Amino acid sequence: MNYFRVSQAIAFLALLCLMISPVNARAADDKLYDVVIYGGTSAGIAAAVQVKRMGGSVVVIEPSRRIGGLTTGGLGQTDIGNKAAIGGIAREFYQRVRKHYQQPESWKWQDQDAYLDSGQSRTGSNEDTMWTFEPSAALAIMQDFVREHEIPVVIEQRLDRTSDSDTSRRVRGVVLDGQRIVAIKTESGQTYRGRVFIDATYEGDLLAGAGVSYTVGREGNDVYTETLNGVQTRHAKHHQFVPGVDPYKVPGDASSGLLPGIDPTGPGKEGSGDRRVQGFGYRMCLTDHPQNRIPFAKPASYDPLVYELLLRNFEAGEKGMPWINSSMPNRKTDTNNRAAFSTDFVGQNYDYPEASHADRETIRQRHREYQQGLMWTLANHPRVPAAIRNQFARWGTCRDEFEREDGWQQQLYIREARRMIGSTVMTQHHCQGSEVAEDAIGLAAYTMDSHNVQRHVDANGHVKNEGDVQVGGFSPYAISYGCLTPKREHCENLLVPVCLSASHIAFGSIRMEPVFMVLGQSSATAAMQAIKTDVPVQAVDYDALKQKLLADGQVLAWTGPKRKTAASIDPKTLDGIVIDDEAAKRTGFDDTSQMIGPFVGVGYRHDNDTNKGHQNLRFPVTVKQAGMYEVRIAYSPNANRATNVPITIYAGSTTFSAKVNQRQRPEHGPFATVGKFAFPIGDAVVEIGNAQTNGHVIVDAIQLLPSKQR
């Protein structure tokens, strides 16, 4: 064993001693804790710290061998949304990260100034926090929290999920007395008794085992009157295949069968709900330092067909790097999914949320092997463009980060599993500000973000991804205390800061590690107040809870600049003939946005002020009654727009031309009038191009309104 493995083994043994020594089997059976926390994620550790600071007794039971969840498992490029929204113990964690990297001994593989000059994007020079870090640094800080507060943490103890019956969700590992949990039992036979319980896992096993109502997958838009839930083929723009990628094992031959990973039943009805889950993957910590790098290895299970879509996408014209390789200290990275075929193992996780412990381990291993094969392919396969292949070949896993000999972590990025249906359900309306939670226990600020959930064959016979949604533009918003609590008739002494009560798309905004820490602290505060006042968690006095949260540094209201969400207009509500950009024939105009409104449909396209003369959209129009029509085009005005956008109208045998100044505010909501033109019965075209334009060109929708003769 080399130096790195020796030091790693010593550190791991120290962690085991730290965690296991406070609790033995008999103590677990006999002791009554104020709070029992199942899940040593970042939320679980923050909750345990808060219990101890409030004078309570607590135990943390972690199914794996490592505390901290994703925060110590590779996600070092913190997804923040807005730093000012993060307070309390969560902010203290990031302050400790800053202090850690102010110590010269923390810089082994890289000079501190070299990292700060490398373009890392999360930490300003005037901050007392730091938002990028190595997994080992995060783990050391979590261990410090545990040691300083003398928190008993028991690792590798999994809830006994053996079902009580074929018809009940309740399990033997959750001991109930009416609507209260009195104890939980692990597979090893240990029992942990408590007054209040917190489910801080990514999977929600404790809430499910207690019989609490939950859901998995995507609700239909109709459930909570949302627009971004359910099947979202209209949003299938980002992380998408180049047009024309063939889905069949033998190109052009449907009888040969679909390539692996393509769902033959997809995509489903637009906006409808399903049980599909957004893609999981490992947030790899990589390095290009020769002494610390483990080269990518081809796994024994390697199947070339699994990566055929990746190679065909390159051959169809994909030029970009299929990863986001964000710089972390000491020449390491946090590596995330990007483009059509990347680190997300799309469609291979649907069973995970409710799978058995053993089946989950199989799913985790399949994800790891997929990603190992992906990295080897990108670094070695001759069909990968040379420039991309050479870039990937520079990197490898780290010798000094995780326990596995191959440098891979254990923690899979569980972006979403079960979601409780609790006292309050957070929805798109809370994110965008049309509903406001009056019982705030923290803020969320990230874009409503869902990764792709499936691959399917489109109407043209080509492969497409579906499920990616990225809609932001709103201010930080309040998270309701009610989304942490089950309905009272289900359970009176359980709080859920991770698998909380939210719709799929709202969860996509809330599900960030700093927010989970915030919610862990708030859950623990509520738990201690419920114990002190001897009431169910649903009956905690909110005013008293709020006072304590504020005293402990939590941020409960946004006082910064308010951002109004750009309004979307349903084209079906508009008069005349309306054609959205989704129905146009497109050359270029690949970039999309929803930042400035109002806009028609799900967003608008723009030319990114590049490739002038080679981008256009042709809107097909069917005229059923001949006559004069006022032609309007929709766009969002801005100072960087072009003043000379060319419009060409093909109406029968006549061609009309005009130009539009997109810096000027449109006269009719999102629409500006181009002019009035004569249209015969039949097919026509309105074309918007970018030839010789002097700024960004926006294309959104067109509208034709009959014009009365005077």
Image (cartoon, rainbow, N blue to C red):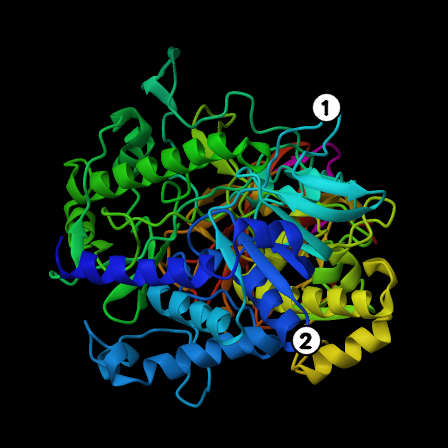
Considering depth in this image, is 486 or 444 the residue closer to the camera?
A: 486
Q: Where on the picture, by quarter, is residue 329? A: bottom left
Name the residue that disc number 1 marks. Answer: 165
Residue at the image point whose x is 75% and y is 34% from the top: 625
Q: Is residue 624 magenta?
A: yes
User: Along the horizontal axis of the image, is 180 left or right of 332?
Assistant: right
In the shown orientation, is residue 489 left or right of residue 514?
Answer: right
Point out which mark residue 55 bears: 2
At x 38% / y 69%, what residue is drawn? 140
Callout 1: 10 Å neighbours few (<14), some, many (20+)? few
Task: Pick whichever, 182 or 386, lies toward us.
Answer: 182
Q: Nearer the viewer, mark 1 or mark 2?
A: 2
**For the residue marked with disc 1, what is the amino acid?**
Ser
Decide: is 402 above or below 357.
Answer: below
Taking 83 as reference, is 319 left or right? Answer: left
Circle 1 SS class: loop
Q: Which residues are magenta?
A: 621-631
| Residue 353 place in picture, x, y as percent | 58, 37
